[in-house]
Structures are given as C-alpha cells and as structure tokens.
Amino acid sequence: MTDQTAARACGIDFGTSNSTVGWLRPGHDTLLQLEDGKITLPSVVFFNYEEDHSRFGRAALAEYIDGFEGRLMRSLKSLLGSSLIDSQTEVQGKALPFRHLLKLFIRN
C-alpha cells in the first residue's frame, strides 16, 4: 500500500495549545506535516499591524516575539462551546467575529 491510496477520512485535532491534522487510509493513518516539518501547529494567530498581514502557528509566535506591533490571539479552542463564539473582538480598529477568526485559522 502506498500513500497514494485515497483517504477515507480526514481528522482535525483542534487543541487549545496545538492542532494537528491526519488522514485515514485503509490500514494506514498519517499525521500531516503542517509547519516546518512538524505534525503540530500552535493554535495561535498574530495580526501584524506594521506589515498588515496575519500569521499562524510558529510564524505567528516568531513575529510576536520579534516585537512587531499587532494582536496575538491564542487558545482559540476555548471559543468553541462558549457564548463568546457569537461575539467579536477588535483587530486594528475593525470588528472581527470570533467565528471568522476560527475560519481563518482552520483555512490556513
């Protein structure tokens, strides 16, 4: 059997600190490399105000640690199952619904 076998399912482990994604193929499951060859991705988003972009995972943490002006958001999973999910926050003077924030993270 090769990795070319069609996947039967894809699973996302959306964790408070880290997230991971896996494929399930007949008799073979695989955790995907998400960032820098690692199978986990920190559940973090950084909105870089200086360069007007957003970063995810380790790249987000690196820009935050490097001192760029912006907004760091972590523990995104804590929004799920809480009343906050229907709320919003402010990022660079604009309203950002928490549902949209989660969509950005999962999409990227």
Image (tube, rainbow, N blue to C red):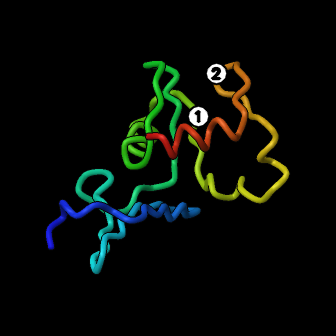
> Residue at horizontal 52%, vertical 43%?
105
Horizontally, is 19 left or right of 73 in the view?
left
Q: Which residue is mark 1?
A: 71
Residue in the picture at 30% in, 51% down: 35
Nearer-the-camera pick, 99 or 36:
99
Q: Which mark is residue 92?
A: 2
Q: Amino acid at mark 1?
A: Arg
| Relative height, residue 32 to residue 74 (above, below) | below
User: In this view, which residue lies farthest toward the right?
Assistant: 83
**Whole-percent x and y of residue 13?**
50, 65
Residue 43 picture location, percent across and down: 51, 53
Q: Dot 2, crowdedness within 10 Å: few (<14), some or many (≥20)?
A: few
| Nearer to us in this view, 52 or 35 | 35
User: Which of pointers 2 and 1 lies earlier in the amino acid sequence?
Assistant: 1
Does dot 2 land on a helix, a strand or a loop? loop
Quarter occupied by the N terminus: bottom left
Q: Residue at x 30, y 75 (%)?
A: 26
Name the kind of residue labelled 2 in the image: Gln
Residue drawn at (32%, 53%) of the image:
34
Q: Is residue 100 above or below residue 79?
A: above
Q: Tell me, for residue 80, which label it has, or none.
A: none
Give how far apart the Cα atoms at labels 2 and 1 are.
8 Å
